[in-house]
Image (cartoon, coloured by chain):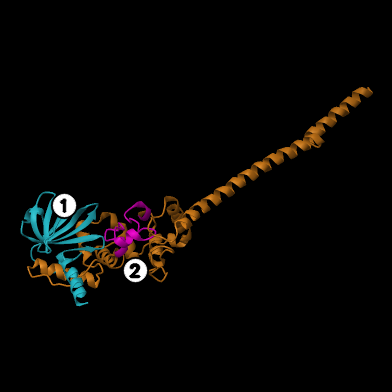
């Protein structure tokens, strides 16, 4: 019984880095590669998630509007993305320190 | 002399017959003509009846055949029928109501906040209906930037917000009067929906209702971005 409980809790905690928000997914992890159209993120469970960037994707660095150019390999990111077919299309990429005003944290 | 008189009388009789149509033959023709016209009228009424029955029966049968499931969106006939019914069921006096509010920046800011807090869960901040709930309601939440909504009169929009719409996801937000200032302000804001900027939409996000799971999730993301080890027990899907 204890073992089953431990396994259940472990699964819950390991499921942290990618989760859904309504139809959105939140990809949370460290940037591994960046191209003009894709960002590869290594999640805390060491899984690799590739997120597609669209012209509508917005970038927020420390609570202020930013751009893809400011994002660097090794940055911690929180990406809100919409699953479209087998792709994840990012609509917001947050990185940098959390803005104390909380503006960057709204979803 | 006698023959001439007799011929004259005969001609006079023919004229009279012709004039008054009182001969059996002409009466028969009249009846036949009336009969044909009557049959033509009956056929017209029959076609009208069949048409009306079809107009009611086809959507009704398709509505019933679809069962109670809200998975599929309503078909075009049902949508048109429902919109026509909605139009007819909003009193004319309500359709003609004029908005007493003026679209000042303050009024629009207040209405935008109100919309984000009360309406956006289904209609989305941009009014597109592109939310999880909006996509799965029956009928779907409309794209309010489109003509189907923007062509409604101010009075119709006010009436719909105040009274809701039966058998849809639209609740009655008011008490049915015509003096609710907040509702009139919302009507002004609905007119603005097609022209909202990205900044407007971003500003609205802070007024969207959030569940405890949203708040927990935000805390988790905040800790992660600030370089702290993310706290376990983060929210699950919601």
SS at badge 2: helix
Which of the labelled discs sits on residue B221, or is there none?
Answer: none
Q: Assess disc 2: are there few (<14), some (14-19) or many (≥20) residues with their C-alpha within 10 Å of its C-alpha.
A: few
Q: Mark 2 lies on which chain?
A: B
Residue B178 on the magenta span: no
Q: Which residue is drawn at 18% across and 51% down?
A: A54
Which residue ends up furthest to the right in the rendered image? B2
Q: How far across and down, in percent of the image, does residue B198 sit?
A: 20, 57
Q: Which chain carries label 1?
A: A
Q: Quadrant of the N terminus of chain B?
A: top right
Q: Residue at x 36, y 55 (%)?
A: B149
Residue A21: image quadrant is bottom left
Q: Colour of chain B?
A: orange
Residue B25 vertical position relative to residue A6 in the rendered view, above or below: above
Residue B98: image quadrant is bottom left
| Residue range of the region highlighted in magenta in the rendering | B121-149
Q: Assess disc 1: are there few (<14), some (14-19) or many (≥20) residues with their C-alpha within 10 Å of its C-alpha.
A: many
Give the Cα separation between the discs numbered 2 and 1. Answer: 42 Å
Which chain wears cyan? A
B14 left or right of B81? right
Tell me, yes or no, if residue B25 can be seen here: yes
Dot 2 corresponds to which residue?
B181
Q: Residue at x 65, y 45 (%)?
A: B42
Q: How far across and down, in percent of the image, does residue B123 sit?
A: 31, 61
- Magenta stretch prevailing secondary structure: loop
SS at badge 1: strand
Residue B54 vertical position relative to residue B181 in the rendered view, above or below: above
């Amino acid at each position: 019984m204890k073992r089953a409980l431990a396994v259940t809790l472990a699964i819950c905690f390991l499921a942290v880095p990618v989760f859904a928000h309504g139809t959105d997914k939140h990809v949370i992890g460290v940037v591994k590669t960046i191209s003009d159209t894709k960002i590869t993120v290594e999640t805390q469970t060491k899984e690799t998630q590739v997120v597609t960037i669209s012209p509508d994707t917005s970038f927020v660095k420390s609570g202020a509007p930013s751009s893809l150019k400011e994002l660097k390999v090794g940055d911690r990111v929180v990406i809100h993305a919409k699953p479209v077919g087998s792709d994840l299309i990012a609509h917001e990429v947050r990185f940098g320190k959390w803005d104390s005003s909380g503006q960057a944290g709204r979803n | 002399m006698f023959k001439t008189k007799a011929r004259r009388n005969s001609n006079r009789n023919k004229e009279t017959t012709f004039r008054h149509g009182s001969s059996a033959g002409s009466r028969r023709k009249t009846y036949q003509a009336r009969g044909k016209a009557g049959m033509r009228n009956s056929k017209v009424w029959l076609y009208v009846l069949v048409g009306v029955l079809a107009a009611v029966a086809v959507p009704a049968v398709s509505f019933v055949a679809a069962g109670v499931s809200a998975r599929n969106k309503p078909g075009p006939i049902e949508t048109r029928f429902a919109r026509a019914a909605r139009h007819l069921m909003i009193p004319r006096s309500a359709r003609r109501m004029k908005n007493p509010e003026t679209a000042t920046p303050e009024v629009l800011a207040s209405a935008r906040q109100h919309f984000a807090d009360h309406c956006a869960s289904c209609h989305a901040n941009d009014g597109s209906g592109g939310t999880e709930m909006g996509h799965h309601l029956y009928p779907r939440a409309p794209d309010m930037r489109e003509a189907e909504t923007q062509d409604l009169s101010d009075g119709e929009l006010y009436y719909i917000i105040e009274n809701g719409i039966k058998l849809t996801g639209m609740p009655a937000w008011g008490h049915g009067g015509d003096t609710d200032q907040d509702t009139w302000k919302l009507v002004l804001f609905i007119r603005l929906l097609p022209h909202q900027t990205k900044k407007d939409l971003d500003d609205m996000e802070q007024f969207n209702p959030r569940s405890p799971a949203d708040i927990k999730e935000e805390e988790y993301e905040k800790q992660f971005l600030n370089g702290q080890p993310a706290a376990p027990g983060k929210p699950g899907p919601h």
